[in-house]
């Protein structure tokens, strides 16, 4: 789920000996498809029933695609195993399955930031790149599926953070354009809250519970203020004035109630429901919110824009879901075919139309008919192509836990922003030195 950004992914050539192993860029070849690794087709044997394992489907669309497969492949049926909605719990259960070498899980829907960790531990199989139309996909999205130049997953959907906002209220308050900076957003809120119908509304929310969503929102704040969590060589670089400005925005927003106090418990669904219930003027969330909000009481009363930043448009964290194949699964030939089916352009179009999931295929963003039907697509493409990835590290679980602990301490007033960043810098240096 959430994980959002608006900056071009820059491949790092360095794989640090300190243990912060960034995903290698890989060879793009003439088409940019990255199909240099061997197919290794001999390892994909066995046909029969398999499982597809993913977080809870809040959109209600996944089973439809699985049913299409099952109707056409009655001897190779797929069973959908739904895990909790939060990414941390999904990751934990997938790791537990891998550590016991269980064949209960076949195809895994993994967060884009898990590729390095899962591949390095050999929990997932390297895949034949020529099996999939990678050349038709957005290249930053394809890179999330690689580790040390080899393909270990297939992009199923991408994700870029968007700013959802109430067009009806902004227009009535005399605000003609969505904000591009944090200051403009808070100024717009002040005008909107003068309206009788908006006096009890809060200004802004994202995801601030101590889970992966907090890592995403912190990364976006830091990147949107000109900072970074790690530098181009993978070295921690979070104890900086720029990073402090990003964290200060979140801390100060809780203090002055720009962000409501209850948002400290928000995950993606909490924020979506608050926005749809008329409790928020602005919301930072993934594009899946669009289709659900269109079915709610605020249909026709909202729109989306790029995330705002300190001095201009902000930066989303790169999110999305890739499909990976468990190293311990049976019926891997079936699994490979199902992965191709599930990640096809036809399936991506279905998920776009019915769940507002960001497709990995570039041409779907440039389709005039789709752009008219889904006016947020140009902003979403910009968000994804300019997104900043979270640290792609083998020890990602420890890194994200350290980020969550320190940032949560700052948001709840247990530490100052300066102390939290200083402590986080030390934590990350220790983790990357292992």
Image: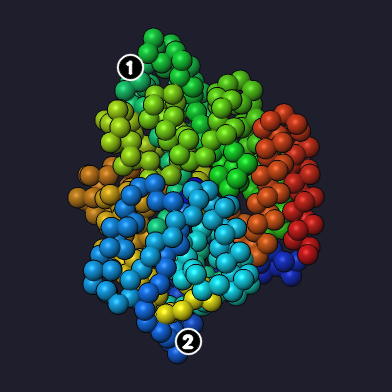
Pick the residue in front: 309 or 255.
255
Residue 64, numbered label? none
Q: Is residue 406 visible?
A: yes
Q: Residues within 10 Å of mark 2 (few under 14, many from 20)?
A: few
Q: Where residue 50 sits: x, y (%)?
A: 40, 72
Determine which quarter of the picture holds residue 90.
bottom right
Calculate the distance from the C-alpha at mark 2 to the C-alpha at mark 1: 62 Å
Residue 100 versus residue 175: which sits nearer the camera? 100
Q: Is residue 376 left or right of residue 82?
A: left
Please give the residue where the numbered disc 2 appears in the rendered image.
Answer: 43
Specify how the rendered protein is coloured: rainbow
Rendered image quadrant of residue 265:
top right
Determine the secondary structure under disc 2.
helix
Above or below, comparing residue 79 to residue 3 in the picture: below
Query: Residue at image x 23%, y 69%?
Result: 71
Residue 166: percent from left, percent from top: 36, 27
The label nearer to you, 2 versus 1, is 2
Q: Is residue 295 left or right of residue 245?
A: left
Of mark 2 and mark 1, the one earlier in the sequence is 2
Please name the residue that numbered disc 1 is placed on.
Answer: 172
Q: Which residue is more in the foreground, 141 or 47?
A: 47
The residue located at (31%, 63%) in the rendering is 66
Q: Identify the residue shown where x is 40% and y is 51%.
A: 57
**Is there CB contact under 8 Å for labels 2 and 1?**
no
Left or right: where does residue 82 sit relative to residue 63? right
Residue lying furthest bottom: 42
């Amino acid at each position: 789920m959430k994980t959002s950004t608006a900056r071009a992914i820059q491949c790092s050539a360095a794989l640090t000996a300190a243990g912060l192993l960034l995903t290698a860029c890989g060879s793009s070849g003439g088409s940019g498809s990255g199909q240099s690794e061997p197919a290794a087709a001999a390892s994909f044997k066995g046909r029969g029933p398999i499982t597809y394992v993913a977080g809870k489907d809040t959109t209600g669309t996944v089973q439809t695609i699985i049913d299409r497969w099952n109707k056409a492949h009655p001897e190779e049926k797929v069973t959908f195993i739904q895990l909790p909605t939060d990414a941390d719990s999904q990751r934990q259960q997938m790791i537990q399955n891998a550590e016991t070498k269980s064949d209960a899980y076949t195809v895994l829907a993994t967060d884009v930031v898990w590729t390095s960790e899962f591949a390095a531990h050999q929990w997932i199989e390297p895949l034949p790149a020529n099996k999939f139309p990678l050349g038709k996909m957005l290249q930053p999205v394809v890179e999330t599926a690689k580790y040390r130049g080899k393909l270990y997953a297939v992009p199923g959907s991408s994700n870029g953070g968007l700013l959802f906002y109430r067009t009806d209220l902004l227009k009535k308050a005399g605000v003609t354009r969505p904000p591009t900076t944090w200051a403009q957003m808070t100024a717009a809120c002040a005008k909107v809250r003068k309206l009788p119908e908006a006096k009890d509304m809060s200004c802004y929310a994202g995801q601030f519970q101590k889970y992966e969503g907090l890592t995403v929102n912190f990364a976006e704040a830091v990147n949107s203020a000109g900072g970074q969590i790690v530098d181009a060589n993978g070295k921690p670089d979070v104890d900086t004035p720029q990073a402090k400005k990003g964290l200060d925005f979140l801390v100060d927003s809780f203090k002055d109630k720009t962000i409501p106090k209850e948002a400290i418990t928000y995950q993606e669904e909490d924020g979506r429901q608050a926005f749809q219930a008329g409790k928020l003027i602005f919301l930072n969330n993934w594009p899946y919110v669009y289709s659900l909000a269109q079915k709610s009481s605020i249909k026709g009363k909202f729109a989306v824009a790029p995330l705002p930043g300190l001095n201009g448009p902000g930066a989303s964290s790169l999110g999305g879901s890739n499909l990976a194949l468990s190293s311990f699964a049976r019926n891997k030939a079936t699994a490979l075919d199902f992965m191709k089916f599930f990640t096809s352009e036809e399936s991506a179009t279905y998920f776009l139309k019915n769940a507002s999931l960001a497709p990995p295929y570039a041409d779907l963003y440039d389709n005039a008919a789709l752009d008219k039907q889904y006016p947020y697509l140009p902003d979403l493409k910009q968000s994804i192509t300019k997104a900043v990835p979270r640290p792609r590290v083998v020890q990602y679980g420890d890194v994200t836990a350290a980020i969550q602990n320190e940032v949560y301490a700052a948001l709840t007033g247990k530490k100052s922003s300066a102390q939290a960043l200083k402590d986080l810098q030390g934590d990350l240096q220790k983790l990357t030195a292992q």
